[in-house]
Amino acid sequence: MVALVVSILISLLMAAGIFWYRGRLADDYKMTWGEASLFSAYIFFLLFVVFGIVPHQWLTLAENEWSFRADRLFDAGGLLTAKSQGGWFPFDITLRVVSDSIAAIIYIIYLGIFSKMWGIWQAPTKSDSTDVETSTYGRPLVRRG
């Protein structure tokens, strides 16, 4: 349980670090090659934690400590008792299916968080009232002379 909580906290703190760093940058700031390389390594480690370590720690906790095995049935306190066990629900749900479904939900939640983060990172922070007119190709139109 401790490993799962620590891995989630590490992932959230690393994500918060991205927002902190983004807030420190000027609107027209261009990253250097070295900064981009460091930031890509940071993002790689964050993705490794989020999509590798956190779901692994959940599955380890569920299967080892909480015994979410394939031979134990999930009946939600009698609400989803399967027909094979004398209930109304049409099929059996094992606890392993529940733990794997929660792992898939973890992936989906983090994917949504990353999509939001990427959108925030790409968006300009302030509007510039001195926008330069652009061509149909998106290049700025600048007069010479």
Image (cartoon, grey):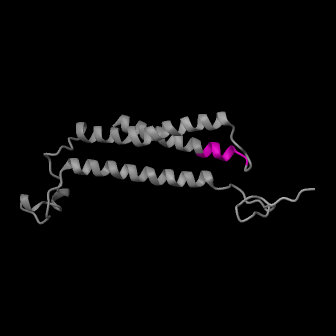
Numbered circles on residues, count:
0
Q: Is residue 131 magenta?
A: no
Q: Compared with residue 90, is residue 26 higher up or lower down, i.e. above or below? A: above
Q: Residue at x 23, y 50 (%)?
A: 97
- Which corner quadrant holds the C terminus? bottom right
Q: Position of residue 48 (x, y in %)?
A: 44, 38
Q: Position of residue 125 (x, y in %)?
A: 68, 55
* Residue 8 shown left or right of residue 141 in the figure: left
- Which corner quadrant holds the N terminus? top left
* Residue 35 shown left or right of residue 59 in the figure: right
Dominant SS in magenta = helix
Q: Residue at x 42, y 53 (%)?
A: 109
Q: Position of residue 15 (x, y in %)?
A: 53, 44
Q: Position of residue 113 (x, y in %)?
A: 48, 52
Q: Is 100 or 133 nearer to us in this picture?
A: 133
Q: Which residue is outermost to the right?
A: 145
Instruction: Give the magenta-colored segment's residue range.
Output: 19-26
Q: Compared with residue 37, is residue 88 higher up or lower down, i.e. above or below? A: below
* Residue 96 shown left or right of residue 103 in the figure: left
